[in-house]
Amino acid sequence: MGKSPNQPAATPPAAAIASAHPAATKAGEQLLAAGGNAFDAAIAVAAALAVVEPYSSGLGGGGFWLLHLGTEERSIFVDARERAPLAARRDMYLDHDGELVPELALNGPLAAGIPGVPAALDHLAAHYARLPLSHSLAPAIALAREGFPIDAHYRRLARWRLEVLRASPAAAEQFLLAGEVPPEGHVLRQPELARTLERIAARGRDGFYSGELAEQLVAGVRAAGGIWTTEDLSDYRIIERAPIVFDFAGWTITSAPPPSAGGVGLAQMLGMLAELHLEDQDRVASVHRIVETMRRAYRDRAAFLGDPDQVEIPLARLMHPYYLAGLARDIHPTRATPSLPPSLPADLPSGLPSHVPASEGQDTTHFSILDDEGNRVAATLSINYPFGAGFVPPGTGVLLNDEMDDFAAQPGTANVYGLVGGEANAIAPGKRMLSSMSPTFAESDQGVAILGTPGGSRIITMVLNALLALSKGGTPADWVDAPRFHHQYLPDVIQHEPDAFTAEETAALAAMGHRLEPIDPKMFGNMQAVYWDRAGQRVLAASDPRGQGAASVVTSSLHLQMPDNSQQN
């Protein structure tokens, strides 16, 4: 019997890629055209972004990959988060008086966790992709060797981190021109990075985590004051975890579990909002309620979340409908709840920040991919601050992350994104630092959305805003373009894009007791979205207009028919 005209199609009519850079989207298209699946394309896109967006992600960083296997109807979370070196200590960024020295966790090799991206590329190729790494890494190798023209965004972030890049001779040689920010249009070639990618293409994870390259990485780090060892690299492992899954407004949401705060935070906020009936509220009342759910979710983030392999997290309680209903009942319909007082988690001392330090919204990256078999990938990758730690071990081409700043280096003291953490996220050897990265799927009979964004501490609330927009209809272009606002418990302020609220709405929110702070839209990330419209039998994709990314829908006619040889590696 034929399929009913009202029955959703079993597979999408096209593939799609949305990424933060046109060259990366093109790399993914090349793999799809060569017979690869969404996972091959994801390897190509991630590696290309490592070349053309060194300020956002790279082989020296980590990330989270949310996968869905179309034929099995199964979702998997691949944790490629960085780990603290085995020699890390909880007081390693404190001075002799016990005061935090923030620069130590931001600049130079002491700030770097053990990278996870190379292991993730190998893991995807070995377990889920069709083609060998020599195929999927080829576009990135060509980009690194032949170069690409830098743009105004590269120049802006390189200028901001100029002194840090200059402090690392290898980083200065790789990313600057005679010690200065290169002019726009300058072709940036990275031959050492190309050789490192070739090693990974030939040897998989062993090409990075053992042998000559591993020794170069460790030698370069230790010579500049870092604490890596070859054991740190050889011991690094990818972890597959069960995603966070919950329902909201007829949609099943699948998102990131700890060590991400994303899935838990989304489940909490949307669970509270289900009790608050936004559909019955006007704009100001809705924003007030959404902000109050953000406040409570970020409070729990600070108190309870960390690396699930090293701390006990009460996940079931934090997401239980009764607990969330209780939090929702505590929200006053017309008055803001001050974050301090009345209640503060017991492990957070006083001296909390009154403002968020200046930070960027595009110092992480995200891409979303769907293939015509129904496989899908949402991946958020990072090196933390723009250009990470600003340090390249000589001879490697690998720019290191500064993700150690994502730990609570001193519980109760804010990190560079203004986030406050407790004992659950304190530094410990081999521990994975808490993250806000939130790759997410939303699925119903209507369709399937693949979402995610950079944006530091604002990532979770940006995904929340997109899911709320999705539940009302519209297209991916609507979701990524909508004005955004954010609250993270501390500091007690609503950050928002300048056009998010009218003057009347701003005044009404202030009258409720909210403090508002407009910020540059570029600090609100670079969302990438793909949507398989099952009802309309079409595929849509959108790249955030705040960035310079590219979204592409690829018809199945571009695909070559090839046998499934997923174990070829």
Image (cartoon, grey):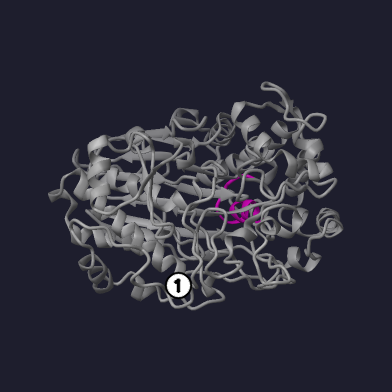
Q: Position of residue 412 (x, y in %)?
A: 52, 68
Q: Position of residue 176 (x, y in %)?
A: 76, 33
- Secondary element at tag 1: helix
Q: Position of residue 456 (x, y in %)?
A: 51, 50
Give the camera-side residue of 206 and 281: 281
Q: Report whether residue 244 is seen.
A: no
Q: Quadrant of residue 87?
A: bottom right
Residue at x 36%, y 58% (from the top left corner): 266
Please provide the residue range marked out in magenta. 119-131
Judged from this view, the residue extending furthest toward the top is 185
Q: Is residue 382 left or right of residue 186?
A: left
Residue at x 27%, y 50% (from the top left corner): 444
Q: Quadrant of residue 277?
A: bottom left
Which residue lies under the disc numbered 1? 304
Q: Position of residue 532 (x, y in %)?
A: 34, 40
Q: Quadrant of residue 73?
A: bottom left
Residue 552 in magenta?
no
Residue 444 to residue 315: above or below:
above
Residue 472 to residue 560: above or below:
below
Residue at x 81%, y 50% (from the top left corner): 393
Give the camera-side residue of 159 and 74: 159
Q: Is residue 56 left or right of residue 19?
A: right
Judged from this view, the residue extending furthest toward the left is 280
